Image: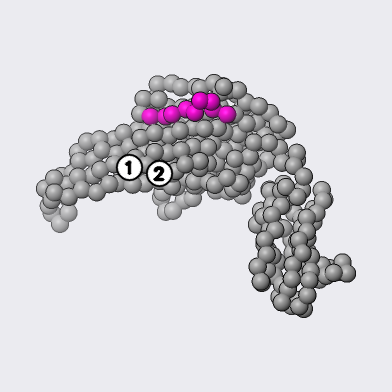
Amino acid sequence: MAEKTTKKLDLGKYTAVAGAVIAAGSVNSQIVYTDVNPDAVVDVNTPFDIDFNTDATVDASFAVVNQAGSATFTSSGQVIDYTYDVNFALVAAANVLGASASSSFAVTALNNGDAIGAAAQFGAASSGQVLGGYGPVVFPAFSYSFNYTAGNFLGAVDKFVGTKFTAGANTHYGWVRVDVAADASTITIKDYAFNATPDGSINAGQMAGLENFAVENKVTIKTTLDEAMINVTPDLIGGTLLITDMAGKEVKSAPINDVNASITYAGLNTGIYFVEARFESGSVNKKVYVK
């Protein structure tokens, strides 16, 4: 059972949002995985802190904040009153994976297998980043209301928060699996993991070191009438994607510079070929017919 670390909610961490309406870990190679058992349910009274590497430093903190009250704004010289009652599901971490748009930042809801590493964009703010926001905004004078919604995790099940943290001079990448209620009233923390190798990447949902898997279990080759597409684990980036004929002669090649790569059949004569993904640790191939 993972040890739950909870504390009195420090709203200072969440002021960027709150001020506006709007275990035990098991080690398998270099991936350190923690199952939160039973799942931790975060609500307005119960935040949840994660210390990935158990160095007594909180690396990510999850909380739910409710903002309710009334306010006014002026439109065409008319003062308009409104009320609001909005929940915000938040993560406070020095770096969470997401995307910036002008002055805003959106935490990305990762799927199982998505890569988390140095190439990703991370927000640097340690104040609360919105996973999901939901609640009614009412304009009494107009008998009008709408539900405010925000965040990529609203109503999410088994989505991942990508994060990174520093330990001394080293940077580590990790993930946290969460559910977020449709009304943003709760966050359920299910498990989390990080790569103990400094600067080593990790896939969302990855629980064991990639070196423990055979090459064929780390490569997916899909083909269409026009091209072959490949997906690999991050440790295989740097390999080569090849097309060879039935005699074993190489007819086309392309570098594998990312977890997704492709090679077209353009220029090939009709016939049977082999698409091969080649790496230092081995290779995977698939027979294709080119029209």
Q: Is residue 58 visible?
A: no
Q: How is the image coloured?
A: one colour
Mark number for residue 21?
none
Q: Residue at x 50, y 41 (%)?
A: 158
Q: Is residue 264 visible?
A: yes
Coordinates of residue 28 in the picture (x, y in percent): 70, 31
| Tag 2: amino acid | Leu
Q: Residue at x 78, y 55 (%)?
A: 284
Q: Residue at x 43, y 29 (%)?
A: 41
Q: How crowded is the residue under tag 2: few (<14 C-alpha within 10 Å), some, or many (20+)? A: many
| Tag 1: amino acid | Tyr
Q: Residue at x 65, y 42 (%)?
A: 201
> Which is more N-terminal, label 2 or label 1?
1
Position of the N terminus, as image quadrant, is top right
Position of the C terminus, as image quadrant, is bottom right
Q: Are marks 1 and 2 in contact (CB under 8 Å)?
A: yes
Magenta part, dominant SS? strand
The residues colored magenta run: 35-43
Mark number for residue 134?
1
Q: How crowded is the residue under tag 1: few (<14 C-alpha within 10 Å), some, or many (20+)? A: many
Coordinates of residue 110 in the picture (x, y in percent): 53, 46
Residue bearing the label numbered 2 = 154
Coordinates of residue 226 in the picture (x, y in percent): 66, 72
Question: Disc 1 on helix, strand or loop?
Answer: strand
